[in-house]
Amino acid sequence: MAKQAYQYDVLYLGSGHGTFDGAIPLAQKGVKVGVIEADKVGGTCPNRGCNAKISLDAPVALQRQLAALNPVLTGQTHLNWDANLAHKGDVINGLPDMIEGLLTGSGVDLIHGYGRLVDAHTIRVGQQTYTADQMVIATGLHPHRLAIPGGEFLHDSTDFLDLPTMPKRLVVIGGGYIALELATIANAAGSDVTVVLHGDQALRAFHQPYVEQVLSDLQRHGVTIVRNTTITQVTHAATDYVLTTDASDTLTADWILDATGREPNTADLGLETVGVTVNANGIEVNDHLQTSVPNIYASGDVIDKTQPRLTPTAIFESTYLMHLFAGETTAAIDYPPIPTVVFTSPRLAQVGVTVAQAQAAPATYTLTTQHVPDDWYRQVGQETSGDNTLIFDQDHHLVGATEVSAQADNVINTLLPAITFKYGEHEIERLVPLFPTIGAAAWGQL
């Protein structure tokens, strides 16, 4: 039951994975929970992020797989953008109602509207105020927009995921996950794609030789990669958009994607008014996800943190807060290894200790590398490129892995338990995977 002074035990601002994965079981435990949402229920991932992206990417991955099996399979495939967009809608359009049903069916009060903190225990939505003992800020991120002349001609990832027509010439500004994933999709859909990198590298958190394999594959499929270039201005001339660079060179496009990053949604929430400490990277929290105001917590991508800003991280944080608020733990949050993947073709995935970290501490770690096409199982699908690196500690526990290949996401998922639970030789010997499968191939490397 809620404390007499407040309407709710816990009130969440935002309804994404940083909220609903924990709010639903928390309400089922008898805790009085409210959730405030100004936009689509479920937040970015279900509505304009992961789910939409992977729906659009699925035929791309299949198209690449079919091409790899030539001449066993012959013929041409064409990605129908209209049909792909419609299929994406079929997959995700029902998710907000489904998530809302899960929330309300568990006893959560869902409050529609824009919420702002009035004080440490009160949020105003329109003319109504709502009070709670504990607050959770889970408002996520929004796309960064370049502040340049002509910036109004740029589009973001949300725009791309709803593109009614695939442009003939598309320029992507940026070298992160979103930039390369959407460049892959657009290229497969027939667009002439140019990717503009501000520096020399893309995906800087990943092992660069493997990143270069991704970039090389994009180039092999017709994508132009422009490095060490800054876009300084965009103008509209007739039917063309003209991008001027810092070297006074120009690029032309029919559509421009600004994929230069994402920023925390912390403005206009009343955080500074109530004393919540915020910086450019998000809300500052302690090891209990507690902000500078003791009864206000934060969850998900809005947090300033070193862990990857990913859906699985938000789910873990939301679940942790559920246990904390239910009185089932008082311990600090203990993050497990969190895997991450770039859904390009080939995929690029990693988890745990990185190659760079291992190479900087040769007395602590041992690295082994495998060339993916050397594995007989990969030859079934005629994979002709790809590599992986496994990182072991001095007791031969697997502590890190990274792979670039068509199956990199599945390989890293397979190896994840060994890293998380520090499997030794005995535990690994006890695992008997289905054969022949990618899982068996992955375990065979250990």
Image (spheres, grey):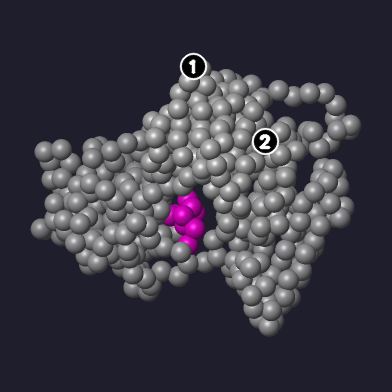
Residue under pointer 1:
238
Please tell me whether mark 2 sits on a helix, a strand or a loop.
loop
Residue 159 percent across, percent down from the top left: 45, 30
Q: Is residue 326 left or right of residue 56?
A: left
Residue 402 percent across, percent down from the top left: 67, 60
301 vs 11, nearest the viewer: 301
Question: Any mark on residue 250, and which?
Answer: none
Residue 62 percent across, percent down from the top left: 71, 34
**Type of the residue with mark 2:** Val
431 vs 131, nearest the viewer: 131
The residue lying at 41 percent from left, 31 percent from top is 150
Q: Is residue 194 above or below residue 203?
A: above
Q: Is residue 440 left or right of residue 15?
A: right
Residue under pointer 2:
223
Q: CA distance from mark 2 to mark 1?
A: 25 Å
Residue 437 in sight from this viewpoint? yes
Few, some or many C-alpha atoms within 10 Å of disc 1 (few <14, some 14-19, many ≥20)?
few
Q: Quadrant of residue 86?
A: top right
126 vs 252, nearest the viewer: 252
- Mark nearer the N terminus (2 vs 1): 2
The residue lying at 51 percent from left, 43 percent from top is 246
List the single residue furthest toward the top. Answer: 238
Q: Is residue 332 above or below residue 284?
A: below
> Is residue 211 part of the magenta span, yes or no?
no
